[in-house]
Every structure is written in structure tokens, then in C-alpha cells.
Image (tube, rainbow, N blue to C red):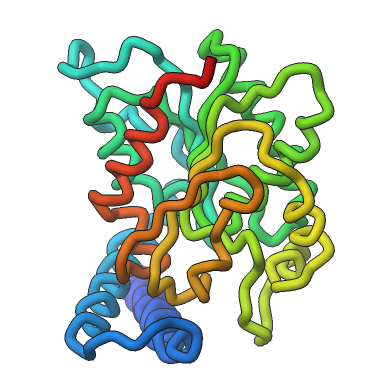
Amino acid sequence: MLRVAVEVAGSTALVVILAIAAYAFGSFSLMGRHVTARELGRSMRELVRELWIGFVTQPFLPLFYLVGHRMDAFFVRRGEEGLATARVPIVFVHGYMQNRVGFFGLARALARRGLGPMFGFNYPWFGTIASNAKRLDRFVQRVCKETGAAGVDLVCHSMGGLVAMEMMRDEASREKLRVRRCVTIATPHAGVVWRGPLLGFGAASLRRGSKLLEAHAGVKLAVPCLSVYSTHDNIVHPKESSSLALRGGRDVVVEGVAHLSILFSPQVAEHVASFLAEPDPV
């Protein structure tokens, strides 16, 4: 029995390693025609970093479907210095084929800056963006009830940014939004150029020119929004695909980091923390 368990674990680990390697090498080779050329050494360093982030985070995907929804329980200490006076809850919204495990590094960085409390929203990425937007709305209501807060800040990665935008598009007609600020990181607001197969009911909405993205493009942002994206994202490219400037948002471009690695960038954490800590418009 033990031998069978070891063999199954070994086979599973091999599949995970091969899947991560295929993702990284394949996506890096395909993005070349959509981004500016860079020296080979820098490209290889970013590839290795993306592989490392994949190997560190992806084996924990199953665990983060099971553990609780708080993201700061592991590293926030009572009485920690530098705690913010305004405790606005932060809700993390993950991307395609992921869950909240990808935000572990960013949550830790934001907690060190006194932000939070922090909550991770898991949703079925294979569902439609519209249905997951409704799930996010219910989760935000739950967080507000649990914390007594009037609203939350959203920090989203990749497809999670589109889920948040869809939720806020629905909320915009309501008397009061429950979102104070929103950050999207590596989100394809103008769609992905990849024309190969994508899994899930919401996959069609990710593609450039989809009806949902065209609808989003025509809506001015109702709350302050920051879009952080990379010059060399191996999934979302060209970089202009992530811009929110024409809709009233703010754009920040970081140099060179890849799609998963961007969530572990100290530079990105600083941009996110600074934006969330800004005083609200009068």
C-alpha cells in the first residue's frame, strides 16, 4: 500500500513539473512577437524565476481550496508595528486556473505595511465571468458583514480583474458601492491574443474582441482603479492590453516580470500598498 502511494505521489509530482515547464517554455516562446526584444540573459533569468514561482506555488493549489479564507492569519502578529489606522479589508481575486495561493507573497508584503485584514476569494475559474462576478459580490457582502466595514479594496490577478470589473459594472447602478478601490495586476482588459484552446465557460470572454470586454471598454470606472502590468508578461501581451487609462484608471508598468512572478515582485507590492494607502478623494 505504501509503495502504491509513493508511486502515485511520484507520478503526480512528475505531471505537475512537466505541466509547469510546458507552461513556462511555451508561453515565453509565444510572447516574442508581441513584446520588445531584450537580451537573452534577462529573458532566461525571468524564465527561471517564473519556473521557480510555479514550482513553489502550484503544488499547494489543492491545500488552498481547503483552508480558510483569511490570507493574513499566518504572519500578522498582534501589536505589530506600523499598523494602518484605517482597517479597510482587502479581498484578493485570483486568475485563470488558479486560486488564492498565488497571493501569499503579496499578502505578506501588504501585511508588513499594516494593511488588511485580508481575505482570499476562491471561485470556479471554469465558470463564466458573469456568474463568478455574482459570487464575488456575495463574498464581498460576507466580508463586510464579518468585519463591520462599509466596503473593501479588491486586489486582483489576471482574469480576476475581469471578474471584479464585471461585478463593479453590475454594482454601478446601485446606490452605494461596496468597493473602495480596485487594483488589477496583469489583467487582460483588452483581451488575450492567444487563439489556441482555452478551457472553461468563461474562456471566450478572455479573448480580444469578446462581447464582454467590449462592454467593459465602454464603462467609465466608478471607483479609483490601478492597473499594474509588465512589459514582458508571457500571457497578457502586448502590454497595452492591460491599460485602464482610457476608462479613468491609473496605469503602472513594471519592467520584464512574468505572469506569475509579478505577484511576488517587491516593486509591485510597493505600488499596490501605496495606492491602497492613499487618502480617499474628497
**Res. 215 image quadrant:** bottom right
Front one among 54 and 206: 206
Q: Is residue 88 above or below residue 256?
A: above
Q: Residue at x 20, y 78 (%)?
A: 45
Q: Nearer the viewer, residue 125 or 1?
A: 125
In the rendered view, would you say 190 is above or below 68? Answer: below
Q: How many marks?
A: 0
Q: Position of residue 10 (x, y in %)?
A: 33, 77
Q: Is residue 4 visible?
A: no
The x, y position of residue 114, in whole percent, is 28, 23
* Front residue of 58 and 36: 36
Return the x and y of residue 79 as percentages of the image width and height.
19, 11
Vertically, is 30 above or below 48?
below
Q: Is residue 120 left or right of residue 255?
A: right
Q: Residue at x 58, y 19 (%)?
A: 151
Residue 74 located left or right of residue 89:
left
The quarter in which the N terminus is drawn is bottom left
| Picture quadrant where residue 264 is located | bottom left
Residue 271 visible, this orientation: yes
Residue 72, quarter of the rendered image? top left
Q: Residue 77: percent from the left, percent from the top?
A: 21, 20
- Residue beneath the point at 79% across and 68% down: 210
Q: Which residue appears at 71% of the width and 42% of the height?
A: 220
Looking at the image, residue 41 lies above or below residue 4: below
